[in-house]
Amino acid sequence: MDLNYSQEDLAFRDSVRAFLRDGLPRDLRDKVLNHRPLERDDVVRWQRILHAQGWGAPGWPEKFGGTGWTALQRLLFDIECGLAGAPRQLPFGLNMIGPVLMKFGSAAQQARHLPRILSAQDWWCQGYSEPGAGSDLASLKTRAVRAGDHYIVTGQKTWTTYAQHADWMFCLARTDPEAKQQNGISLLLIEMTSPGITVRPIDTLEGAADVNEVWLDDVKVPAAHLVGEENQGWTYAKYLLGHERTGIAGIGHCRRELRYVKALAQRERRNGAPLADDVRIREKIARIEAEVMALEMLLMRVASEASQRGAGVESSILKIRGSELQQALSALQVDIAGPNALPFSPGWLADGFDGWTPEPGYGANIGSFYLDMRKPTIYGGTNEVQKEIIAKAVLDL
């Protein structure tokens, strides 16, 4: 399913394939292809392998240690990593706070944090959502009060992904309670070992504990950890979310799971014949393949334009389509596997039980994967909120 790439693009793609063939550890590949959870060390190890290759930050400019790749090269890299079964790079440092620090951070913040993001010395988490401020993020209640050369931060964050692993959090907090909601918010960098921080896990449907509640009780944060200007955090937050939503599209992930759907349909049989011969299944696969191709072409165009003028409302379109396709692919796997998708228990997975798989060592744990894919339409701003953003832009409201 290749688009009309130039010979130069194809040569670049081949170099990425060669690196992944030799450089991607087999145990990491097997975890990804079998929908198994990755440990902190797995993600760190893969980031350091990429960093040693000079590919640690595909989207960063060279002056900050990035690759300087074009938008199309970054897209090809994402696709090939997805197809090969490489772990996704941790987005919170690379795709979220990293670009914000490059544009709005101080020279000291850039020098301190950007190299450690590249080398995976620091793991970041995102302190945005709160129990009463998810989609309506501007209503957040976490407070930061200036006290000399520090801020005192008090509040609660929720759905904080990988907070249990994090060294740092980029946190939105209200610094001017009298200002209009969006105008009284600041962005702070908070070290997770600071006294007053408590992290508690939230169990999710598939039995994982990747998301957390985080309490901040009178946490002292040096004023030097303020990003940009006080009360301008909403501007930085929107800039960050544009980068996050573009990344959620996950075209490499979609390409890999589409390939698995086809293998699954060839292996699973009804009345002695493979399901791939069933016209209804073929129609479903053809439809979703066309949608994945359309997403890839849209991503190429948006990424190219964003490199010139920054991420805009198009990032919301990509977030919607990418997240919906990821859910559709997981649902189609369940449809094809039928009762074979049912056996699922986190305890069984921990003990090495693979469930049913159409190919040894590839594509197990369909039930777990399906449950995990309920999340993409929620995180990064719910799809309902993204539709409001698009409507306001189109209608000029």
Image (tube, grey):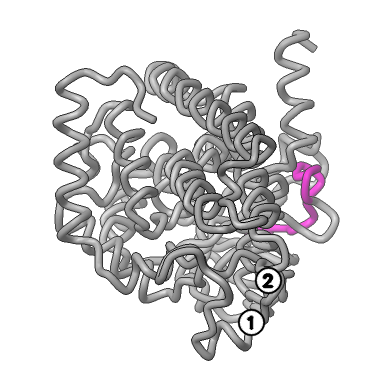
Across and down, in percent, residue 249 comes to 54, 38
Q: In this figure, which residue is indicated by the disc labeled 2?
A: 206
Across and down, in percent, residue 7 comes to 16, 21
| First in residue order: circle 1 vs circle 2 | 2
**Front one among 368 and 342:** 342
Which residue is farthest bottom?
351
Answer whether residue 160 is magenta in the image.
no
In the rendered image, which quarter contains the N terminus? top left
Q: Magenta stretch: give its range.
A: 134-146
The answer to whether the residue labelled 1 contacts the one labelled 2, judged by CB atoms less than 8 Å apart, is yes
Label 1, label 2: how far apart the Cα atoms are = 7 Å
**Front one among 319 and 239:** 319
**SS class of the residue under badge 1?**
helix
Which residue is farthest right?
132
Q: Tag 1: residue type?
A: Pro
Relative to 34, 210 lies left or right: right
